[in-house]
Each structure stands twice: as C-alpha cells, then as structure tokens.
Amino acid sequence: MSDRPRILIAGGGVGGLALAQALRRDGLDVAVYEQDPTPTIRNQGYRIHIDANGNAALRTCLASEALDLVRRTSGVNGDLVAGYTHRLEEVTTQTFPGIADDEITNVDRNAFRQGLLSGLADVVHFGRTVAGYRITGSGRVRVEFAEGGGEEGDLLVGADGVGSAVRRRLLPHATVKDLGVRCVYGRMTINETTDALIPEAFNRGLSWVADDKGLGAGFAPVRFRSRPEGASDYLMTTLIGTPERLGTSDEDLFKLPPQDLWKITVEATTDWHPAVRELFAHADADTFFPIAIRAGERVDAWKSGPVTLLGDAIHTMPPAGGVGANTALQDAATLADELLAAVRGEKSLIDAVAAYERTMLPRGFDTVDNSLRMAGRMFGTAD
C-alpha cells in the first residue's frame, strides 16, 4: 500500500485499546469510538486474569512506557488456583511457581484501562456509539453514530463487545447463547479489619467455592504493586447461579440496586462456612452488579472486506478460565501485525484482514469451547 490506511475501531475495551496502542505506536491513523461517556464508567467486572498469551500480546502491542504503567499498576502476582466445597473442604489445587516479576497475572479493570489509554488522548472519543456502518462506492467504510454524524475510514474493527452493532450488520446470522446463569459481582475493600478475614490461600490467586445445589462463588485479590490514586486493594467477590438459585427473577435481578444484590449474596450463603460468609458480609454493598453469562456460537468464515471483528464482538466467552481478555489481546496483536505488514507493502489491506481472520476465528472459538467445558463443570451448564 502506498498510503497509510485510516483505521476506525468501535469500542474502547481491552482489545480495541490494545490494537489502537499498537497501530498508533507505528504511526497509523487510528480513531477509537467508545460509547461510555468517560473512561471510568463501566460495570464489567473488577479483576482481570492475565496469562502468558496476554502478556505476550501486551509486549507486542504496547510501547515500553505504556507497558510499564500497566505492569506497575497491576496486582501482586498470584500462584494458586484452588477449589473448595461450601464447607471450605479443599477439592482441587493448582500452583504456578516461579512466575517472573515482570510477568502480569492480574489487573484491576479500571487501572488496566487507564494504562491502555495512556498516550491515546487524541485517539479515543468517548460518548460516541457506533450504531452501524455502510461501505461507500470507493470501497471505504463509513460508520454512523447513535448520537448523530459519522466518520469514514479504510477499515472498521468491531471491538464493541457482546452486543456488537458491527457484528449485527456484518454477520446478522451470528448468535450469542445465554447459558442461563447469572453472576453477581462485588468487592471487599482490604483494610486492617477485613485483611484478617481473608483465608491465607485466598490471597494467592483465584479460589472457587461451590455447594451441591448449583451455587458457586469466586474470590480473588487485587493488591496493587503501585496503587493508583484513589484506588484501594480489594478482594473481588462473585456469586454465580441460576436466577432460581439466586432467589430472584431476571426481571427483578437486573433492576435491583447494589445494596439489594449484596443482600442476595449474604442470604444465599447463610449455610456456608463462616469464613466465606464473612467475606460477603464485609463486602462493599455499593459495589454489586449482575451480568448474564453468555457464549458466542461458532460461525463459518465470511468473505473478508473492510470490516472485521475482535474479542467478545465475535467470540464471546464465559468467564470460566479467565481467558476472554487474553484472547482479545491476542486478536489485537495478530491484527496489528497483519495491518503493519500491509503498510509495509507486503500485502493488501484486505489480504491482511483475511490473514487475521484465518487465525482469529479458529483460535477464538476453540477457546470458547474450552471455556464452555470449564463452565459446565463450574456452573452446571454442561450442555
């Protein structure tokens, strides 16, 4: 290609921002459109697990300054994943010794987003919702915003999550399956009082506690290496089950205020081990919110063009295994490599997109399948 393409990215989440970092670092014209009005308004969770694939992708996408900021504001590394009965009887345990200090194992979602936003002030446009797009007569793509107006570029990347408007337009037949289970997220600020309540093993990574009635709870700490301004160390709490097991309908669950959601977690675990009950009892009641757990269903490859997809916008996956963000980061690294090859004149822009999709599609949906198998064991959704 003789001219550098203009890349439009719908969505300023993990994958979209990592891609923007990689492209901007190499001088490409890139714009990110994010529906959130500010960088901090987002109820998607608190703690994100970063694995070896995610670390490699971050090294590929981020300049050294941004990577250093992400690393400095990440959580102290953990080395344990363990499973327990609701009586705190150990069922499974897996340790990960010898993790290098420069590796990242967990990040706070908000701190991570701030790190990924560093240096992109003139690239990311908040309060801009990509509602659709059209291909122009010259083969370019024009996005239309729900707020009015639009922009034109050479490639549109839909990184706009599970409800992707770009996916609905590009692949109207693609479906996302509701697994029928709900997750109530919350967190407990770690202070002198609450720190003593956390079982020793729970401080070392992810701990999963489940009863024999289809209810499970996950706990994982974020103890910042270098605490961002206004942030506190915390223990992420999750309670997962069907609406029936949680004792409320979907219609009510998604309307309840945070304090009432917190009460659900306390009441649902009244017959659990006292140490677990204390964690929910001392959690910050105003931090609770629900999500539906869903998974994208595999789609066949399509004819590549000036629109593609990334992360949850194409291969939504349940949180089992903590691989969703890592897969989005892999997508960003792969797409960036292909687009930069096009800029160097090694292939056309469309050939670069096609090469990316040949890698992304099987990798993403294989990861979804693995997550579904794990979700079946954890949440009782084996079908």
Image: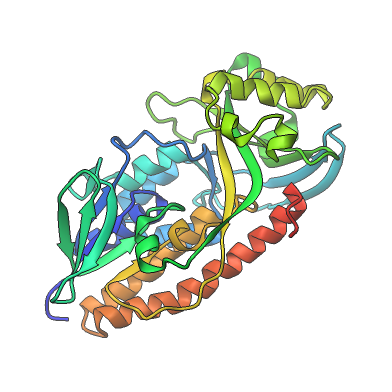
- For residue 379, above or below residue 62: above
Image quarter in which the C terminus is found: bottom right
Q: Residue at point 58% right, 43% down?
A: 292
Residue 342: percent from left, percent from top: 25, 79
Image position of 371 with respect to 366: above or below: above
Q: Quadrant of residue 153?
A: bottom left
Asked whether residue 214 appears in the rendered view, the answer is yes
| 305, 323: nearer the viewer | 305
How far from the left and from the top, in percent, is residue 215?
76, 38
Q: Which residue is located at x 13 percent, y 76 percent?
A: 138
Q: Quadrant of the N terminus?
A: bottom left
Residue 104, above or below 216: below
In terms of depth relative to the viewer, which is nearer, 176 or 44?
176
> Residue 244: horizontal and vertical position, in percent?
73, 36
All told, the count of numbered labels is 0
Which of the pair 225/167 is nearer the observer? 167
Left or right: where 229 falls relative to 126: right
Determine the residue positioned at 44% across, 26% down.
Answer: 231
